[in-house]
Image (tube, rainbow, N blue to C red):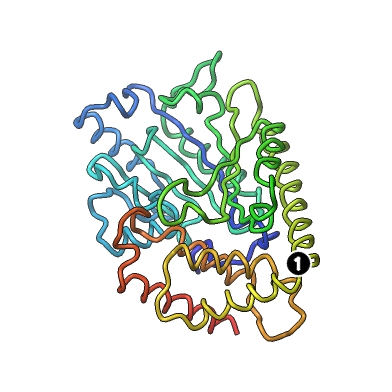
């Protein structure tokens, strides 16, 4: 089975992925920031004993070799640039065959259960809910009749649920006031929107995260309902802006589109920022290209975008722009574009 983000998703011209995360804590243990090493090992063993090994691989993070860390970073299990590998002796990660479902132990809360799917696919909620419920049936979960599920982060207390859509918005970001207007619209749904990265080499990408906010005073069904209404609005707005730019500035857009494809297809070296900018223009104009000379699927664009965004190296490191890394990145891009023919 291929890794989860290699598959084609619905509305993948705009939505790169849909994620659902549920956090839980176990009675009898302090929250992670106050958990000493001895109790942390006890927590890891307690969870390991109830994990269904017929479903999940992985385990103790200290056993992961470099290649495993690289793979799990690209699969978005270890967090951006593998940040969750800090203090690996206090953590464990379990994941299913295509890594679309995972359980992290010791990353923020005692348990973080996450389900992911390419494109627009809210069914991830049912998948993560089932996995979390199975663990809850085997563990004594911290719960309050007044406050719901208890967490060290008060913004997660209650349902402990987060829904996140990763979206590519090349046209809205290129429209004057576009992001400001979208931010206001997102806020009306009581959700939030923020750049995939606010610093470093990939800070100027067109990729954003749209995330649920409320976990108290709102039901899971209400969160899902608002999220689906919101993401539908975002998809419509982005497509409308693409049409506006592609039709009213056709000659300019077509030129940049062709140049962008040439850069990706033939460059011997390329930085993360340059690659993401080129992908942005191809995504914006591809549906309006009537030349028939360039044929790139949304799936290939999303695969490349995901690979570049989740490269297992901090975005502020100069090594990200070294000759060897830029050459390796260009080779990967050429390989994927050739395979898309």
Corner quadrant of residue 225:
top right
**Coordinates of residue 43 in the picture (x, y in percent):** 30, 33
Q: How many marks?
A: 1
Q: Residue at x 44, y 26 (%)?
A: 153
Residue 50 can be seen in this image = yes
Considering depth in this image, is 309 or 162 the residue closer to the camera? 309
290 left or right of 325 in image: right
Name the foreground residue: 181 vs 87: 181
Q: Quadrant of the C terminus?
A: bottom right
* Residue 134 in the image: above or below residue 74: above
Residue 33 in which image quadrant: top left
Toward which corner of the image does residue 239 lie, by quadrant?
bottom right
Q: Residues within 10 Å of mark 1 (few under 14, many from 20)?
A: few
For the point 34% across and 45% down, the residue is 84
331 lies above or below 299: below
Where disc 1 sits, the SS reads loop
From the top left corner, tell me how far across and down residue 158 is, in percent. Answer: 55, 24
Q: Identify the residue shown where x is 42% and y is 45%.
A: 103
Residue at the limit of the structure toward the top, as seen here = 146
Q: Is residue 283 above or below residue 94?
A: below
Residue drawn at point x = 60 percent, y = 36 percent: 192
Residue 305 placement (x, y as % from top left): 52, 64
Q: Is residue 1 visible?
A: no
Q: At which x and y percent is residue 244? A: 79, 60
Residue carrying label 1: 249
Camera-side residue: 9 or 245?
245
In the rendered image, the vertical position of residue 79 relative to residue 140, given as above or below: below
């Amino acid at each position: 089975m291929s890794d989860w983000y290699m598959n084609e998703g619905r509305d993948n011209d705009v939505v790169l992925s849909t994620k659902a995360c549920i956090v839980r804590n176990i009675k009898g243990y302090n929250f992670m920031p106050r958990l000493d090493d001895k109790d942390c090992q006890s927590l890891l063993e307690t969870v390991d004993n109830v994990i269904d090994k017929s479903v999940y691989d992985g385990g103790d993070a200290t056993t992961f070799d470099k290649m495993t860390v690289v793979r799990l970073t690209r699969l978005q299990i270890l967090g951006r640039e593998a940040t969750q590998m800090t203090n690996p002796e206090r953590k464990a990660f379990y994941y299913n065959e295509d890594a679309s479902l995972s359980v992290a132990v010791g990353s923020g809360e005692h348990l973080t259960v996450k389900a992911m799917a390419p494109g627009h696919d809210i069914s991830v909620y049912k998948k993560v809910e089932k996995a979390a419920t199975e663990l809850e049936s085997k563990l004594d979960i911290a719960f309050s009749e007044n406050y719901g599920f208890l967490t060290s982060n008060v913004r997660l207390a209650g349902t402990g649920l987060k829904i996140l859509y990763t979206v590519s918005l090349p046209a809205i970001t290129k429209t004057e006031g576009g992001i400001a207007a979208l931010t206001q619209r997102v806020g009306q749904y009581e959700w939030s929107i923020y750049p995939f990265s606010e610093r470093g080499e990939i800070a100027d990408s067109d990729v954003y995260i749209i995330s649920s906010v409320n976990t108290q005073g709102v039901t899971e069904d209400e969160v899902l309902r608002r999220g689906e209404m919101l993401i539908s609005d975002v998809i419509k707005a982005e497509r409308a802006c693409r049409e506006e730019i592609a039709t009213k500035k056709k000659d300019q857009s077509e030129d940049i589109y062709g140049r962008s494809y040439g850069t990706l297809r033939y460059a011997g070296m390329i930085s993360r920022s340059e690659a993401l900018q080129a992908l942005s223009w191809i995504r914006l104009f591809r549906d309006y290209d009537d030349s028939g000379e360039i044929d790139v699927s949304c799936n290939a664009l999303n695969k490349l975008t995901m690979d570049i965004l989740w490269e297992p190296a901090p975005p502020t490191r100069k090594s990200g722009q070294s000759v060897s890394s830029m050459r390796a990145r260009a080779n990967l891009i050429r390989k994927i574009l050739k395979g898309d023919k």
